[in-house]
Amino acid sequence: MYKFTIKKRVFMENKELFDVFKQESDERMQIVVTDMLTMEELGKNDEKIDEILRELHGLKGAARMIGLDDIVETIHALEEMFRDIKTEKMEFNKGVIDHIFSEIDKIIDYANNLTAVPENKGKEEKKPEKESKSHLFLNVNFEKVDKLINEINDYTIFFNNLYLIKKDLENLLDSVNGEDYKKEIKQTYRKIDTILKRGTIKIKSIHEAVFALRMVPVDTIFNRFKKDVRNVASEEDKKVEFVVQSGDIEADLHILRRLSDPILHILRNAVIHGIERPEDRKIKGKNEKGIIKISAMYEGNNLVVKISNDGKPIDYEEIKSVIIERGIVDRSVIENYSNEKLSQFLFTMGFTTRKDADYTSGRGIGLDAVKKIVEDELKGSIYLSSDEKETVFTLKIPLTLSSTDAAIIEDAGNRFAFPITDELMFVKYGEKDLRQIESKVYLLKNNAIYPVLFLNDILQYDKQISHGGHALIVDSKENPFSIVFDKVEDIKNIVINKLPYPAENIPFISGVTVSEGGNPILIMDLNDIKKFAGNEGIVRKSKIKGKEEKRVIKVLLAEDSPTTRDVETSILKKAGFDVKAVGNGKLAYDLLKKEHFDVVVSDIEMPEMNGFELASLIKKNEKYSDIPIIIVTTKDDNEFIQKGIEIGVDGYFLKSKFNEEDFVKKIENVI
C-alpha cells in the first residue's frame, strides 16, 4: 500500500540546485518533525496533519522538478499515511509514530547524502535564468563569507599601516622649520586623519554586516535535537520532555554546527544515564516524565549553552572509588577534592564508572571528545555540576572565532596576545608578592595564593630574572594559577588568523594576529596552558616528600582551598611540624577523634562544617578543649574576631598579611 524506496547516495550535476534543495528539505522537514513531536505528546491534530501535508507536498514537488524520483515515491507514501490517519483509516499509535519517524529520518539522510558531481568536463555551463522574485530565502555560501571576512581583515591591517604613516607625519611636524610648511603639513595631516576615521568606521560597519550573515538563531540547531531526544527516549522506554529556552539568541553557524555533536552526545547521556524509567521516578516521588532543558544566553563576548536534566545525580563516591582503584590519586588527597574537581575526571579519555562500558554505557565515555571540541577547536570551556535536583553541563564559547578582545603583553622583548575571558585578571606584582616554597613559586594577591608559571618557561625562551612586572591571574574553577611576564602593553580587539603549515600545531599557540606595523603577534592558547599548569602541579607535588621529624608537633590543618592548603602544609612541614590536612571542619573533627594533635589551624569558610563550628565543637568537648586553635582567614572584621573570642579561639592569622616566619611563630606561641 505504502511504497518506501530510497537510495543511499544520489549525484546531482547542478551544484546550485543541490544546495538549494538541501536547504529547502531541511526547513520543510524541521516543520514536519516539530508537528509530529507535538502530536506524539498531545494526540492527533488535523491542523498539524494539514501543515505536514503541505510541507511534504512542497518538498515532493521540488524533488520531482530536479528528478529525484526515489524521494518522490517515499514522500508520496508518507502523504497517503497522513491522509489515512486524518480520516481515521489508520490508528495514530506508537508503532505508526515510530514508523513515520523512521521514514522522516530516511528523507533527511537522503537530502544530507546528496553529492554534487565534480565540475563539468568540457560542458559549457548554461547561464542561470533570471531569479524568480518568489524566492523567500537567499542561499548563503559560508566559504565565500569567510573569504570576504579575511579580505576585510587584510584591509584592516592596511588601515593600521596608514595610521603609522599618520603618526610619522605628526612627528615630522616637530622637526619642520617655517610656518608655511607647518601649516600645509597640518592641513594634510587633518585630511588624512578625517579619511582614516571615516574609513575605520566604515570598515567596522562592513565587518559587522558581513559577520551578521553567519549569525543564525540557535533555535534552528537546538530544535533539531527534539527528534533525537525523542528517538533515544523511545529506545530506552523512558518518558522525556525536551525544553528549548533560547529566545532571540543568535550565534555563528560554523560554531553551532561544530557544537552539534558535543550537544547531541550530552543529550544522549542525559536520556540514557540521567533520566530514570517512569516506574523508578514514581517511586522517588518525581513526575514520570523527565525534563531535559537546553538554553542559550549571552555573557559578555561569549555564548553560554546550558544542558540540564532532572534525573539521578552523578555518584561522586563512585568516581572517588574508581580514581583510588586505578591509582590516579591517593586516597588521602582525593577526600579533599570538591565535586567540581571530581567532575573533571569524567572528561578524561577512557574514564568511566562502569566496568562493562561501551560507547553509550557509563558516565564519561565520549566526554573527552566533547571537551576536546569545546576547548581545543572552539577555544571555549565546559563545566559540569550535579546535585539531587539536576545535573548541568555549561558550555561557554566565544561568539566568533575570527576576532576577539585581547591583551597584548610583552616579555623579554617578545609580544604575545592573550584573549580576554571573564576568568582572567591582570595585576601588577613586586618581589614581595612572590613566595618560593620548596620547588614551587606562589603569587600572593587579593587575599589569595596562586601557583606561578613563568611565560618564558612555558614557551622556552631565555630571560633575565625579574623582580616585578605584571601577572595574569587565571581564576579557573578547577585549577587557579598565575602567569608572570614583564608588562601589559595594550588591550584591544584583534583579528585571529590561523597559523600556516607546518606551524599550526605548536603547543600553547592558537593563532596569530598582525600588529599595526605589520609584525606577527602569537595568540596564546589558554586551554593548553591550563593543562600544562595542572600537569606541572601534579609533577611537582609528586617530588615533594615529607621530612622525618625528630620532635613531632602534630598540626591538624582544615582548609578547603587546595592551593592554600598546599602552601600552609609546606610551610609547616618545613618548620618541623607533622601536618595532617583536610578540606573542611567535619573531616577535621572526625580525624581528631582518631588521632592526637597539638594544635588545630583552620580556615573559617568551608563546606559541610566551617571553622567556627569546628572550634565550637572542640572547645565544648572536655577531651579536646585544651587544644589551641588558630583561625587563618581573610576576614578581619570585629564581628568575626568577637565571635572567635566567644568560642575560645586562641589566635587569628590574616591571609592578607601572610608571612611564613610570623605564621610559624604564631603556632609556636600558642602551643
Image (cartoon, grey):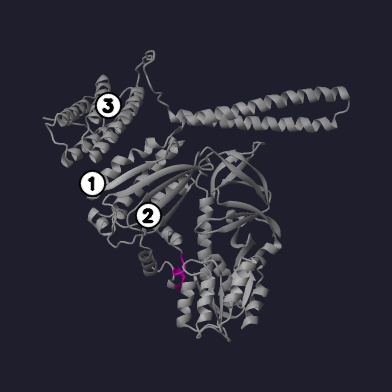
In the picture, the disc for residue 55 is: 3
Report if residue 243 is visible in the image.
Answer: yes
Q: What's under tag 3, amino acid-wise?
A: Glu
Describe residue 59's horizontal placement relative to residue 176 as left or right: left
Under mark 1, the amino acid is Ser
Circle 3 sits in a helix, a strand or a loop, which is it?
Answer: helix
Instruction: Return the residue found at the far right.
Output: 178
Q: Nearer the viewer, residue 289 or 14?
A: 289
Which mark sits nearer the N-terminus, 2 or 1?
A: 1
Q: Which residues are magenta?
A: 332-337
Residue 580 visible in the shown view: no
Determine the image quadrant of residue 649: bottom right
The stretch drawn in magenta includes residue 261: no
Foreground label between 2 and 3: 2
Q: Which x, y percent locates residue 355? A: 29, 63
How packed is label 2: few (under 14 Cα within 10 Å), some, or many (20 or more)? some
The label shown at residue 604 is none
Label 2 secondary element: loop
Q: Check residue 335 for magenta coloring.
A: yes
Q: Quadrant of the N terminus?
A: top left
Sequence order check: which comes first, mark 3 or mark 1?
3
- Tell me which residue sits at (25%, 41%) in the image: 41
Task: Determine which residue is flagged by label 1.
Answer: 234
Q: Is residue 519 left or right of residue 77?
A: right
Residue 242, image x, y percentages: 32, 44
Q: Which mark is residue 390?
A: 2
Name the one closer to the observer, 605 or 374.
Answer: 605
Marks 2 and 1, how far apart in space?
22 Å
Residue 205 at x, y = what percent?
57, 28
